[in-house]
Image (cartoon, grey):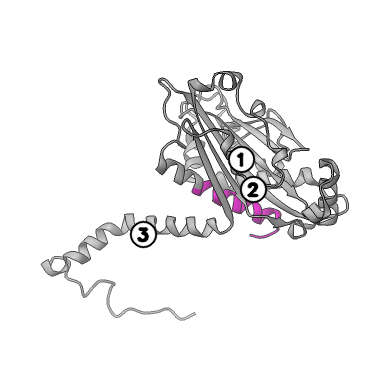
Amino acid sequence: MARMAFSSPPFAGLNLAAGNNTPVKVLLALAPIAIPAAYMVYLQRSLARHTAASAVICPPDSLSSLATSSSSSSSELSLSDRDVFPSDVRHHPDQYVVARERVTSHAIPVASLRPEFISKKGNLSGLLDSYLSATLTAFSWTPQAIMMRRMVSGLEDPEAYRRTFDAEYLSACRYRPGDRVCGVYVVRSRSRSKGRVVLDFAPPEGWKGPVVEGVLIVGFDLEVAAARGRKNERESRSRSGSEGEGEVRFVNETVMWREKDGGKSTPLEGRVGRWLHTLMVRRLVVKGVQAVMGER
């Protein structure tokens, strides 16, 4: 391919020292801020075409309002507060501030998933592993994760900690209780019937980075056409996985809490922090969906 030649360097005709070029200098000065900001707005709008997001902060919101506002037809599968919150938060909610963010993919036809997930022996457990692995691998390349990977001062086994960010490790992980991924997340529980994995924010001993109380809830909901009626959960999941019927909606939830008196605000409480976090999670959901559909 022929190279395009310039007769003079870019901006060669601009006298930036001249007073009448002040607007040009201002634009050039603002470019390092304006261009990334414009890209982030574009990215948010693009991701919003494939995902939906909602968040509640309690107080003043009620934690139940998030589940109430969900349009998922599989709402009966959602985890209970007992599965998410420690006993202190459940029994003394007035003493805590809780932030809960939910990002979901748009409904996707089961038939569009990779063949191994919709065969007669559809591996729904494998679907959950593949989706979770893809989202965590995408997270491992974010600036946040890159910084976390370098925070090894004080850790007993820095190499083992770093390895939990590797794509090979995340791909091979079976996400069983006790498994550590991306440094600071540990699988607490896994429910096949509910299609969910719960991960605690649990940094290793010696960790000197920021610490928050919270969990990640990752999984999917299968939705069977209403005209065919609902069967029991195990049967409906078997039919969808084996015959390619219905639709699937992938879910990523982030829940954080702190003591109301004296606790440091969580990233989800501020508008800017929540917007940035939601943007990141939208992208992770899209990456996860692309992986289980065989897209790049």
SS at mark 3 in the image:
helix
Q: Residue at x 55, y 48 (%)?
A: 53
Reply yes or no: does residue 265 show up in magenta: no
Q: Measure the alpha-carbon separation of dots 3 and 1.
A: 38 Å
Tell me if mark 3 has few (under 14), some (14-19) or many (20+) residues whose alpha carbon lies within 10 angstroms of its own: few
Q: Residues within 10 Å of mark 2 (few under 14, many from 20)?
A: few
| Disc sitting over residue 104 in the figure | none
Residue plotted at (49% across, 36% down)? 148
Whether 279 is drawn above or below 59: the answer is below
Q: Is residue 141 visible?
A: no
Residue that appears at 38% across and 55% down: 37
**Residue at numbered disc 2:** 71
Q: Which residue is mark 1?
A: 68
Residue 108's x, y, as percent? 69, 57
Q: Is residue 40 above or below residue 201?
A: below
Q: Earlier in the sequence, mark 2 or mark 3?
A: 3
Residue 206 horizontal side relative to residue 244, left or right: left
Task: Judge from the rendering whether residue 231 lies leftward or rightward of residue 13; answer left or right.
Answer: right
Are circles 2 and 3 on residues that touch, CB within 8 Å? Answer: no
Percent position (x, y) of residue 271? 41, 42
Mark 2 is on which residue type?
Ser
In this rendering, the label closer to the viewer, 2 or 3: 2
Amino acid at the residue labelled 3: Ile
Q: Is residue 257 above or below residue 135?
A: above
- Give percent across and percent down for residue 119: 85, 54
Estimate the spatial distance between the alpha carbons at disc 2 and disc 1, rounded to whole Å. Answer: 8 Å
Q: What label sits on residue 35 in the rendered view?
A: 3
Which residues, given as a range, are shown in magenta?
279-296
